[in-house]
Image (spheres, grey):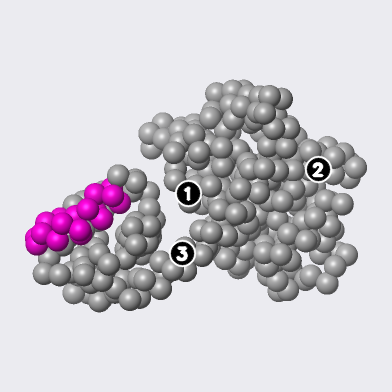
């Protein structure tokens, strides 16, 4: 049943096409082992032809980590799957970069997945995010006050590269599949420690909501996520259309600017837009310049929109150290610093 559900998800979101070469991130836990095993069987029993390579990273945090690495290696050897292994001292990286262990682990993992993808000329990277992970993410975003875009949760496919074939499958379904397939995955005991926000949401908040408010909270949150994603996609199309209408000049790397990027938009046209589109377009333009929206918060976007509405020449704001947004002579300049 799980494999059929995964295949349905793959087809629905066009996650995999014939000829794709996929790097699968595998920790050795139930989710990633179910994903890997299911993809092997789907390739064997369906019309899909695609390559599979495994990338496993050992975070060097727990004593059981080496055992998990050997487990993944043995499984790959048995199934004739190429496996790349990397060991990283994630806790040390977190201290040096002054970030949380979770964030450091995520950075290390995705960096390694990209590295392996380049080595084997893969065009897709599959991770084992499931329906429960998505529900947890939506709840965490609500708690943080992330805005409507945060309600879409984890996307089935991102940047046409990162795919989540398990995104419609629940943790219960995955665990049952592992048992039926005799996979004997490794269990990360730290997932039961309520130190991190996600663990608190997973182990405390969701069970409380299930017991006292809604036993189907996972399904409800995933339904909300799908609705939000559809609406967000619609708004995004409108933002991209509006961007083309207000755009005066776009320089994404130029010798005259010492390789720095610059975008100029029409102030009058921008101010005529609906507030929702203004906010999204402001963020969209910043991302085009910087490649990301990190450290750009809601208050920054509101201040920038207010700056444009005031229409006072030669005024500027720096929402972060990498970009300067200036209003001058009927134009809005987005300049990489």
Disc 1 to disc 2, C-alpha distance: 29 Å
How dense is the environment of label 3, judged by Cα within 10 Å: few (below 14), some, or many (20 and up)? some
Residue drawn 63% across and 24% down? 204
The quadrant in which residue 297 appears is top left
Q: Earlier in the sequence, mark 1 or mark 3?
A: 1
Residue 137, percent from left and from top: 57, 41
- Dot 1 falls on a residue whose secondary structure is helix
The residue that appears at 44% across and 38% down in the rendered structure is: 145
Q: Nearer the viewer, residue 103 or 242?
A: 242
Query: 279 or 257, which is in the foreground?
Result: 279
* Comparing labels 1 and 2, the label whose residue is closer to the camera: 1
Q: How far apart, in angstroms, are the residues tagged by discs 3 and 2?
A: 33 Å
Q: Which residues are magenta?
A: 300-316
Query: Which of the numbered marks, if any, corresponds to residue 173?
Result: 2
Marks 1 and 3, how far apart at CA: 12 Å
Which of the labelled discs sits on residue 269, or is there none? none
Tags 1 and 2 touching, CB below 8 Å: no
Question: What residue did someone put label 3 on?
Answer: 236
Label placed on residue 148: 1
Magenta run includes residue 304: yes
Disc nearest the viewer among 3 and 2: 3
Q: Earlier in the sequence, mark 1 or mark 2?
A: 1
Prevailing SS of the magenta stretch: helix
Q: Are marks 3 and 2 in contact (CB under 8 Å)?
A: no
Q: Secondary structure at mark 3?
A: helix
């Amino acid at each position: 049943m799980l494999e059929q559900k995964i295949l349905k998800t793959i087809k629905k979101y066009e996650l995999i096409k014939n000829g794709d070469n996929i790097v699968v991130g595998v920790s050795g836990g139930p989710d990633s082992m179910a994903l890997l095993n299911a993809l092997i069987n789907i390739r064997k029993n369906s019309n899909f032809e695609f390559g599979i390579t495994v990338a496993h990273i050992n975070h060097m945090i727990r004593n059981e980590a080496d055992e998990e690495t050997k487990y993944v290696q043995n499984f790959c050897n048995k199934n004739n799957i190429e496996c790349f292994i990397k060991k990283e001292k994630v806790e040390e990286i977190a201290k040096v970069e002054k970030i949380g262990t979770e964030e450091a682990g995520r950075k290390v993992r995705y960096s390694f997945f990209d590295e392996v993808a380049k080595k084997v000329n893969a065009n897709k990277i599959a991770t084992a995010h499931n329906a429960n992970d998505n529900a947890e993410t939506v709840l965490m975003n609500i708690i943080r006050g992330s805005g409507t875009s945060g309600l879409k949760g984890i996307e089935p496919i991102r940047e046409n590269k990162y795919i989540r074939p398990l995104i419609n499958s629940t943790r219960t379904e995955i665990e049952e599949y592992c048992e039926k397939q005799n996979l004997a995955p490794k269990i990360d005991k730290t997932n039961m420690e309520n130190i991190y926000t996600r663990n608190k949401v997973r182990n405390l908040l969701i069970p409380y909501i299930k017991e006292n408010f809604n036993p189907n909270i996972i399904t409800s949150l995933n339904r909300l996520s799908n609705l939000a994603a559809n609406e967000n996609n619609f708004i995004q199309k409108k933002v991209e259309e509006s961007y083309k209408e207000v755009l005066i000049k776009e320089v994404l790397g130029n010798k005259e600017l010492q390789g720095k990027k610059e975008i100029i938009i029409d102030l009058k046209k921008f101010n005529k837009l609906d507030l929702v589109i203004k906010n999204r377009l402001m963020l969209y333009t910043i991302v085009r310049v910087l490649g990301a929206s990190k450290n750009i918060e809601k208050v920054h976007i509101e201040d920038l929109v207010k700056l444009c509405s005031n229409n006072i020449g030669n005024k500027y704001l720096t929402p972060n150290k990498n970009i300067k947004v200036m209003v001058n002579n009927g134009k809005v300049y987005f300049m990489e610093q």
